[in-house]
Amino acid sequence: MDITKVCDDITELDQDTQAAVAEFMRICKEKGLPIRIFETYRPQARQDYLYAQGRTRPGNKVTWTLNSFHTTRRAFDVIHKDLLWNAPESFWNAIAEVGKSVGLNSGYYWNKQDKPHFQLDKGKKPIIKGADEMAKATEKEKGYGKMAIENLVKNKIINSPESHLADLDGYMPSWKVWVILNNIYEALKGDK
Ligand SMILES: [Zn+2]
């Protein structure tokens, strides 16, 4: 890998950070913020190379640390799509707010401001809109499946429900199958 080259590949980030970037990009698009993901993963050799700039190598200092979240695959830098680093303050502020809403630590708020920088701190999970709602719906759906299985057991249509109940966790639509079976049973039982 060429340490002088910037890597802007999102898939080089870890799973949680990829999810955070995806949500970050979705919201930026929704808000009409023209962003460009400039840099994602940075091998330690590249971090060392950048650190040397303005120190043992000519140029302006571009980083103050050897321990960057970029090297742990949990950081990415964002710039304005057209204005690059010369974007107005309102742009940097707006994207920082988006980052915060997604659970990212935005360099915009740091004492040593790093406006393009976003990182998912250690142990943090991204906040994805709608994810909680989906989890709730799934719990609710599993509840319907459980009620259906219990009713079928009670009426001796099936026995040993353990594996069926375990299925509700692993196989998402399985709850529907049990609800349908139970509905059929309930509809037919009067006919006997
Ligand atoms: Zn950065």
Image (cartoon, grey):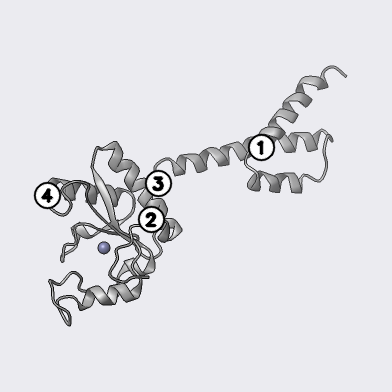
Q: Which residue is nearer to you in this view: 36 or 14? A: 36
- Dot 2 beta carbon under 8 Å from ligand 1: no
Which amino acid is tagged 4? Glu
Separation of residues labelled 2 and 1 (CA atoms): 35 Å
- Between disc 2 and disc 1, whose residue precedes? 2
- Between disc 3 and disc 1, whose residue precedes? 3
The answer to whether residue 122 is left or right of residue 29 is right
Classify the position of the C terminus by image quarter: top right
- Dot 1 beta carbon under 8 Å from ligand 1: no
Separation of residues labelled 3 and 4 (CA atoms): 26 Å
Separation of residues labelled 3 and 1 (CA atoms): 25 Å
Residue highlighted by disc 1: 175
Q: Which mark is residue 89?
A: 4
Q: Nearer the viewer, mark 3 or mark 4?
A: 4
What x and y, as percent, mark residue 54? 14, 76
**Which residue is painted at 76% across and 24% down in the image?**
184
The answer to whether residue 169 is left or right of residue 52 is right
Which amino acid is tagged 1? Trp
Circles 2, 1 touching at the beta carbon (< 8 Å): no
Residue highlighted by disc 3: 128
Crowd class of label 1 (few under 14; some 14 to 19; many from 20; radius 10 Å): many
Indicate the secondary structure of the residue bearing disc 1: helix
Q: Does 54 sit above or below residue 93?
A: below
Q: Nearer the viewer, mark 4 or mark 2?
A: 2
**Which residue is painted at 74% across and 38% down in the image?**
150
